[in-house]
Amino acid sequence: MTTHKNVSDLAVNVLQKIKSSKHISVLTGAGVSAESGVPTFRGEEGLWNNYRAEELATPQAFERDPNLVWRWYDWRRTLLAPLKPNAGHYALSQMENFYDNFTLITQNVDGLHRMAGSKNLVELHGNIWLMRCTAEGTVMENKNTPLVAMPPKCNECGGLLRPHIVWFGESLDEDILTRAFRSAEQCDLFFVIGTSGVVQPAASLASIAKQNGAMVIEINLEPTPISDVADATLLGPSAKVLPGLLNAMQKD
Ligand code: BJW
């Protein structure tokens, strides 16, 4: 593991690889949105410090008490509604224009990457602005905050709606997972940014990229289990490091 504080400290071969790679894959986590004001999950200020995941983010919790789960999501949606992408989100959306093949895989459900203009986006854990009918499986967008009716019901069939989010113990969408794995397997360069690297299967993508010959570069405030796999770890806030990286890419 090699850690750096500044993009300019990266070894010449790493900078060369960043500039010459054709196929880039990026995995982001909650840390990327932290500087927009979105709470992370783990760590001192993390959501899981004040709320129990088993009571709010599992299918069993929703079955037991859909009102409780929806109240938590309503609170989070209301918190997220006024928030805007930060310089890190924008730098990633600009990087997409720089490379022939660029895939942004996010664990975040906040929709900020799309708002920043990222296009080839894989939302691994769903999206907090989408709801799914538990009776028919239909997915619909709903941006109301706060929600008018609690718990929300499907306009078509009256069935109970749930957040279109992957909870613990639930399988990820097969097509979405295939896109993520394929991109990790085929890329030359894999960035892993602002994730604690403890939630599977997302956390395994960096190792898959590495095993298939990619260079792995991590950006985080602190080392994570993924740092052992990474060729270089840039320690710093992504809203500062990513614009610096974009700048370095654009220099001859
Ligand atoms: C900054 C920064 C700044 C801060 N700049 N950086 C194999 C082994 C063991 C367990 C499992 C396994 N396979 C499956 C499991 C079970 C489970 C799992 O992984 N559990 C682990 C916790 C042990 N996985 C699942 O259940 C998944 N399903 C699945 O695999 O299905 C098949 C299966 C099922 C059951 C058994 C076996 C197989 C589904 C996972 C769904 C995750 N869902 C959540 C919650 C959604 C709820 C919601 O949002 O409403 O998704 S959990 C939560 O964690 C959320 C996130 O997307 C995810 C990852 O968190 P992330 O993004 O890494 O955030 P943090 O907070 O952890 O980290 C922030 C990082 O940013 C930190 O490192 C900071 O330092 C850094 N940071 N500010 C840069 N400014």
Image (spheres, grey):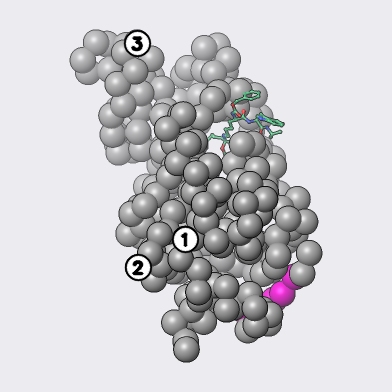
Which picture quadrant has residue 14? bottom right
Question: Label 3 to label 1, Cα distance in Å?
Answer: 40 Å
Q: Earlier in the sequence, mark 2 or mark 1?
A: 1
**What residue is shown at x 35% (from left), y 28% (from top)?**
131
Per the rendering, the mark at residue 97 is 2
* Mark-to-mark CA distance, 2 and 1: 12 Å
Q: Is mark 3 within 8 Å of ligand 1?
A: no
Q: Residue at x 28, y 17 (%)?
A: 154
Which image quadrant is residue 91 in? bottom left
Q: Position of residue 63 (x, y in %)?
A: 52, 12
Q: Is residue 218 left or right of residue 116?
A: right
Left or right: 143 with respect to 236?
Answer: left
Q: Nearer the viewer, mark 2 or mark 1?
A: 1
Q: Are marks 3 and 1 in contact (CB under 8 Å)?
A: no
Query: Callout 2: helix, strand or loop?
Result: helix
Mark on residue 175?
A: none
The image shows residue 242 at horizontal and vertical percentages of 52, 70
Q: Secondary structure at mark 1?
A: strand
Image mark count: 3
Please tell me which residue lies in front, 13 or 32.
Answer: 13
Which numbered dot is residue 23? 1
Q: How crowded is the residue under tag 2: few (<14 C-alpha within 10 Å), some, or many (20+)? A: few
Taking the magenta stretch, the answer to whether it contains residue 6 is yes
Name the residue carrying label 3.
135
**Residue 119's spot in the image, x, y percent?**
33, 54
Q: In this picture, which residue range is highlighted in magenta?
A: 3-7
Identity of the residue drawn at 50% across and 24% down: 69
